Image: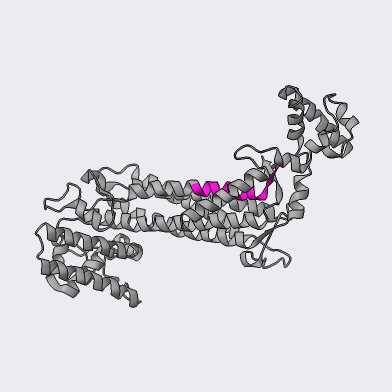
Amino acid sequence: MTETKNLWGGRFTESPDQTFAEFNNSFKFDKRLFTADIRASIAHCEGIFQAGILTRPEAERIKNGLWTILKRSDFDKDYFNDSTVEDVHSFIESRLVQLVGDVGKKLHTGRSRNDQVATAFRLWLRDEIVEIQQITRELQKSLVEAANRQKDAVLPGYTHLQRAQPVMWAHWCLAYFEMLARDRERLDEVWRRVNVLPLGSAALAGTSFEIDRETVAREIGFEGVTSNSLDAVSDRDFAIEFVGACALIMVHLSRFAEDLILYASSEFQFIELSDAVSTGSSLMPQKKNPDALELIRGKAGRVFGHQTSLLSMMKGLPLAYNKDMQEDKEAVFDTVDTVKISLKVAAIVLKNLGLREDKTREAATKGYLNATELADYLVQRGVPFRTAHDVVGKTVLYSISVGKELNELALTDFQKFSSEIENDVFEALSLEKTLGSKNQIGGTSPERVFEALEEAQRSLEIEN
């Protein structure tokens, strides 16, 4: 039986049960915090040197040892193949002591694994949030590009999955652009709350050594330090909030995927997905399945589950740290991986789809999508809206009975229901007028949509 190296053996006279040791071990997943923990340890080393705990030669020896460990991990593919360590923190410490001797054992002065873990986790997550924001921006860019490729295209908009009113394709693209913009704002807010240093809180009560926490924070780019040691080591609000922000990203990606899955179906035939983002059937040779989009839709539930698991884990924990909180890592790690790949695949799908403008335009002119325009036409002639609504409803019912669209009726047909309707009604019911009349801010008129498209493009360019 392999003996596990840990950081807490002095109190114990027996080795842990092997099954329990494996159950307790987190190195297989928390090694992702390796670089972050090295960075935080280097800053802590400087902090305890400034506090007079280390001499300058000792501090330099420890920091050089930490840098060496970091470099070795880059070129030694077997570096992390160590089944004897409990977690990434004991792994680093054991390697450090191997390199620099007993002076390496001084590094843990003034800190606990509780504040050490929280610091490495925040430092790692801070960088991941920045990367997710960048990938989200790339998807926004892909949406703008997709809108510009078929800038004049029109498709039916839906409510209750029933055709409602025509909209510009670019308007549809920009709707998702706006959702992602809010997602990035939320990530900004999460990043700000992540970017606070818990190191110096020790196990739960703070440290008795004169470590300048604010200087340590500046060393690794934290904007401030935590104000309460009990809270600092037991807080996982930042992780829950991050996963919550990611859950909303996945909601938006899932809705995006659902729209395109419907649009790619034989019933809609609005879009054609290239072979690059589709798969076939093992049985039915004619099939072309939107698997990339279905996977995005499915993976949304995975992230929702992580949010629920984190909330459930934390809801009954007393202050301060409890081992339950080890469960935070895998939930957050998998959330990061899932959101990143889903955002990337969504962008790839946009680059590999074509809108079938003939089909979407035909759909946008069928099914009485200009009924609201007829009601607005009557309102502009002084008819109260509720009266106009009733008149149009009866006109639509008549149109259905004779198998014609509204704009295919004769003027005499319209005048059966309202004497206010005149020959200019046909212009009002045209697709161009239906779109063009939605000219207020946020509307789907070509003028407004093209302005919004240019503004979206400018907002992305400003960030470069």
Can residue 292 be seen?
yes
Q: Name which quarter of the figure residue 149 lies in.
A: bottom right
Against 370, residue 250 (above or below) is below
Residue 106 as seen in the image, left or right of residue 186? left
- The magenta stretch is 166-181
Q: Residue at x 30, y 44 (%)?
A: 317
Q: Residue at x 22, y 71 (%)?
A: 95
Can residue 200 be seen?
no
Against 158, residue 375 (above or below) is above
Please count the marks in the image. Answer: 0
Q: Residue at x 21, y 55 (%)?
A: 216
| Foreground of the two, 185 or 421 | 421
Against 10, residue 192 (above or below) is above
In reply to whether residue 170 is colored magenta, the answer given is yes
Give the position of the N terminus as an image quadrant: bottom left
Q: Residue at x 51, y 54 (%)?
A: 460
